[in-house]
Image (cartoon, grey):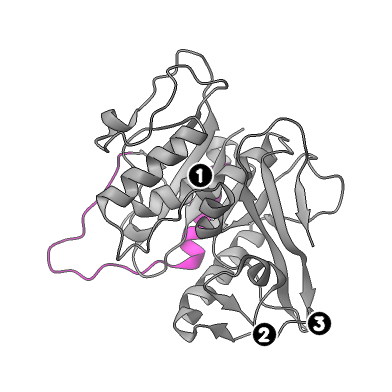
Amino acid sequence: MAVLSVDLAHRRWSDLGIVVLDRARSADSVRLTPSQSGLPSLVGQADVDPEPPIECEILTWDGLTDGLALDPGHEIAAEAGSKAQRVDANILAGRLNHLCNVRGIRVIVLDGPQAWKSRHNGLLYARASERQLNTAGKTGLPGMVKPVSLRAYSEFCLDVYDALSRRGWKRLDTQGEPGSALDRVIVEGNPNAAWKSLGIKPLPSKRKSKLIHLAESYGALRSLIPITTNRPPNHDQLQAIVSGLPGLALDEHNTAGARIVGNPPRREEGHWREGYIVLPVPPVRGGGIRWLQ
């Protein structure tokens, strides 16, 4: 089954990174190599992969459509001189839900905080998952974010999770056996931590990132995990790809392919608190999901 991964953004629809990850269905699947993608081939890779590649279908949406036309190559430019439309959390959740219904997708991976800090987690300014991964942004008690410049983005992310919850999606929990069937589950990812978990240098921030950085990260990722893309990924889309890998592992019941960090999500004083961040791990034989408490 496929997984939907989204690198969230709240200012412009064009800043969203939206990727559907799925396993290649046959050995004849066409591969887009780094050289074919237009990115320099900086890291070598064997001609034959030991397992079917992960096909990454990159989608682009904007704020001018109703979200029903899901052509991967569809882009509509705003009229000259018009102001780019900000992303509405409820509209975005509706589009994501619709896409998942059309494609039969049961797992969504979102890059962004899903909840506030629990008052009882023993930390002053962060959720347990954020503290363990030393994330740049920290989500404190309701309304408190560090740095404060991330408050609008963090509240937007929480609104997206809540809007999906109203449509029947649930935050990833550990009730039941790890690796059991997942059905309409939202998984929180973190691309910066995901790169580190794979042993790859994280991408610089979007503002500082250049083509050479995308090429190096793309090549390093493909040297580790067989990946194809329907077109060259930009910064947001590459971040969505690396964040989405553990969601695909969970959906496939590949218990060696995901590392789960933090405390389970729960309701506390009328708000969602804590929640797991799920990371990819390098391909290994055997083992199981790595639970860090």
Three-letter residue code for mark 3: His
Relative vertical location of residue 63 with respect to residue 183 in this rendering, above or below: below
At 55% from the left edge and 57% from the top edge, which residue is drawn? 110
- Look at discs 1 and 2 and give the one toward the viewer: 2
Residue extending farthest right: 176
Residue indicated by mark 2 = 141
- Observer-nearest of 261 and 233: 261
Q: Which residue is mark 1?
A: 99
Question: Can residue 70 be seen in this snapshot?
Answer: no
Residue at coordinates 78% horizontally, 78% vertically from top-left?
121
- Asked if the residue at tag 3 contacts the one at tag 1, i.e. Cβ–Cβ closer than 8 Å, the answer is no
Q: Amino acid at mark 1?
A: Leu
Residue type at mark 2: give it. Answer: Leu
Cα distance between the residues tagged 1 and 3: 37 Å
Image quadrant for the N terminus?
top right
Task: Give the magenta part as a residue range.
Answer: 73-100
Residue 54 visible in this rendered orientation of the protein: yes
Between the C-alphas of marks 3 and 2, the distance is 10 Å
160 over 271 or under it: above or below: above
